[in-house]
Amino acid sequence: MSEQLVAKIQRLKRERNAVILAHNYQLPEVQDVADYVGDSFELSRKAAATDAEVIVFCGVHFMAESAFILAPHKTVLLPERLAGCPLAETITEDDLRRKKREYPEATVVCYVNSSAAVKAESDICCTSSNAVQVVNSLPSKQVLFVPDANLAHWVAGQTDKEIIPWRGHCVTHHRVTEEDVRRAREAVPGAVIAVHPECRPEVAARADFVGSTSALLRFARETDHREIVVGTEMGILHRMKKENPHKKFYLLSPGLICPNMKMTTLDKVARALERLEPRITVPEGTRLRAAAALEKMLAVT
């Protein structure tokens, strides 16, 4: 890591009155330069609460949109404009409108890993941390859950609601297989296996712990096990190792790398601060409707 480049970022951050946010899956050097590291919605809430005028979101497009939804008076920058999310891209607002017509009695629960436009078409949002709580809070018996089918399956196992899943997947988590779990058990027989609920149902069923990125980080801190096999994007290992230097961490599958999360570099962070570009905004009508879905979630949790 270039000390000169880091110093430049810190100087620009002060000059712009900016805050730098980095998702847990970002490159280690990007995490290290950030003011806050965490999951997407947790970071958006922190950014909205700060006095910073500029938010630099080191993540993917829907995350920067969420920050703007919560803090429309701030300048929101995404250092790499092309950093998208294949899961979020599996559904559009038109897709959701058509699906809603098929299930007019269903309440639409939208995972935050989705576009602002899809959030705006939804009744309430959820995160992987609170998805079960949100679903169980609803008066309706039928829930249309978008866009992640694996998360929907995991929620379905913890509720008596009828869950209608959208057939979207996070390609990074979905490529993990049962065979990866079997191999990990053989390779590190004393380890505990902890995975994200975006993994396939059969992978989650064979794991020792299933939880969101925040829950996985908490589990890593609190478990008595000294060896942990982690089933989520590899970027989280950097933080886990920093927080738990006395423990050993292993990646469940070599496929657990999200190319979009690795597109943001320190050079791009510095460039974004210099130019105040690329800016992410959301049309006001869409923003207000998406904000309402997010606020309903916050009222529950």
Image (tube, helix red, strand yellow):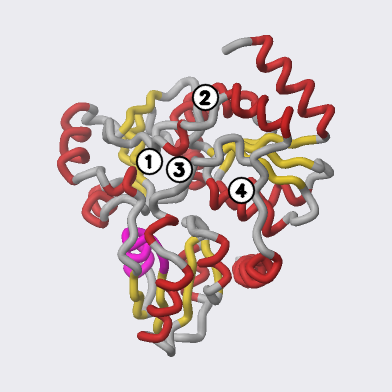
Q: Residue at x 77, y 25 (%)?
A: 12
Magenta-drawn stretch, dominant element (helix, strand or loop): helix
Circle 2 sits on which residue?
Answer: 28
Mark 1 or mark 2, which has the lower sequence index? 2
Is residue 10 depicted above or below 138 in this figure? above
Q: CA–CA distance between discs 3 and 4?
A: 23 Å
Mark 1 or 4, closer to the camera: 4
**Classed neighbour count for the residue bearing mark 1: other residues with Cα under 10 Å, few (<14), some (14–19), many (≥20):** many
Query: Mark 3 and mark 1 in contact (Cβ < 8 Å)?
Result: yes
- Determine the secondary structure under disc 1: loop
Disc number at residue 64? 4
Which tag is nearer the camera, tag 1 or tag 3? 1
Q: Is residue 6 visible?
A: yes
Q: Residue at x 68, y 71 (%)?
A: 285
Circle 3 is placed at which residue position? 216
Q: Nearest to the eye among marks 1 and 2: give it.
A: 2
Measured in 3D between alpha carbons, the distance from the residue under mark 1 to the one under mark 3, in whole angstroms, is 9 Å
Quick one: label 3 or label 4, which is nearer the N terminus?
4
Q: Does dot 3 land on a helix, a strand or a loop?
A: helix
Give residue 143's position: percent from left, percent from top. 41, 78
Q: Which mark is residue 232?
A: 1
Q: Are marks 1 and 2 in contact (CB under 8 Å)?
A: no
**Nearer to me, 238 or 84:** 84
The magenta-colored residue range is: 146-157
Label 4 secondary element: helix
92 displayed left or right of 296? left
**Looking at the rendering, in which quadrant would you find the N terminus?**
top right
Which of marks 4 and 1 precedes in the sequence?
4
| Vertical position of residue 215 compared to residue 292: above or below | above
